Image (cartoon, grey):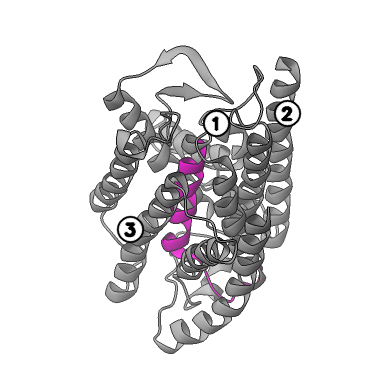
Amino acid sequence: MKAILLAGGLSLFLTLVGTRYAIRVLAAHGYGQLIRDDGPTTHHTKRGTPTMGGLVIVLSTVVSYFLAKLFTDRSPSASSLLLLFLLVGMGTVGFLDDFIKIYKQRSLGLRSKAKLVGQTVVAVVFGVLALSPWFRDGHGRTPAGHAISFIRDFDGWQLPTFALVLFILVLITGASNAVNLTDGLDGLATGASGLVFGAYTLVNIWQNNQWCERVHTATCYGVRDPLDLAVVAAAITGACFGFLWWNASPARIFMGDTGSLALGGALAGMAVLTRTELLLALLGGLFVIQTLSVMLQVGFFKATKGRRLFRMAPLHHHFEMLGWEEITVVIRFWLITGFFVAAGLGVFYAEWVAGS
C-alpha cells in the first residue's frame, strides 16, 4: 500500500510542477495546437495553445512508479513493466503525430495508415510478450490470460495465442482511438481517464486482497501481479489529476495525441492484465459512447447520401453546436463517466459477493 500512495502522490506532484515548466518550454518553441476550421467557432481562440502535454503524464507516471519501487525496496513486476511499455509505446506514436502537426503546420499529423501501423506494432509486441512463457511466475501464470474475460475468464473461451493477440490488438487500438476522440474539450479526456484509472486502482487492490496466493477460495483472483498493477494505476491517476490543474477550462496546455493514445492504450492494457477486458466497456462507457457517435455519424452520412445524425461528431461537439457552454459539456460528461465507473465497480463487487 505504501508504494500505491507514493506513486500516486509523486505523480500528482510531478505533473503539477512539470506541466507548468512544460507550458513555458513548449510555448517558447511555438509548439501550439492547430484547430480545425470546420469545428465549433469558439475553439478558434485556442489556436496556439501549447500541446504535447501528454509527455508530462507519461514521464511522471514512469518516474513515480520506479521511485515508489525504489523507496519501498520492491522489484518491478513483469505485468507493470509491460503496461509501462504500452504507455510509452503508444505515447511515442502520439508524439510523432503531434510533432508532424506542428512541424508541417496542419491539423492532421501522421497519415491514418502510418498511425495504425505504429499502434499495431506496439499492441502486437505487448500482446506477444504478455502471453510469453518468458514471463511466467512460480505458478505458471503469464501476465495475460488465454481467455476473454469480463471479471473472470469465461469457461470454455480459451483462445489460441494468435487469436488472443488479435483480440488484444483490436482492444488496444480501439481504446486508444476512443480516448483520442474524447480529447476535444478542455479537461474532458483527462478527467474521464483519471476517474477510470482510479477505479482500476480499487479493482487491483481488491484483487490483491482476494488473490489466490493470499486466500484459497472459489472467488479468489488469478491475476499475476495485482498489487503492482495498482501502483501503476495510482501513478496514472495522479498524473491525470495533476495535469488537469493546467488542462481544465480554460486550458493552458493540451495533452495532444501523445497523452490520449498513451492513456487509451494503458486502459486497454490494464483491462488485459487484470482479466477485465469486457468490464472496461462499462467502466469506460463514456469513451464507448463517443466512439459510437462517430461510427453512427459516418454510417448515417453514407446511408442517407449526405445527411447528418448529429450536428457534429464526436458527441461532445454536438452539444456545443446546440449552444451548451464548453464547461457545461465537460462537467456533465465527467458525471456520466462517474456513473459508469460506479456501475462498473458495483458489478465487479456484486460478482464477488454472489460467488462467495
User: Is residue 184 in view?
Assistant: yes
CA gap, disc 2 to disc 1? 13 Å
Tell me the CA gap for discs 3 and 1: 25 Å
Q: Relative to residue 80, is residue 19 drawn left or right?
A: right
Q: CA distance from mark 2 to mark 3?
A: 36 Å
Tell me: 255 left or right of 110.
right
Q: Position of residue 118 (x, y in %)?
A: 27, 51
- Residues at badges 2 and 3 in contact (C-beta under 8 Å)? no
Give the magenta part as a residue range.
248-271
Q: Amino acid at mark 1?
A: Thr
Residue at x 69% of width, y 21% of height: 351
Q: Report the residue marked by disc 1.
A: 276
Quadrant of the rendered structure where residue 188 is? bottom right
Name the residue carrying label 2. Answer: 349
Label for residue 167? none
Q: Which residue is mark 3?
A: 93
The answer to whether residue 172 is magenta is no
- Neighbourhood count class around disc 3 (C-alpha, 10 Å): few under 14, some 14–19, many 20 upward: many
Tell me the SS state at disc 2: helix
Between 288 and 68, the one lying in front of the other is 68
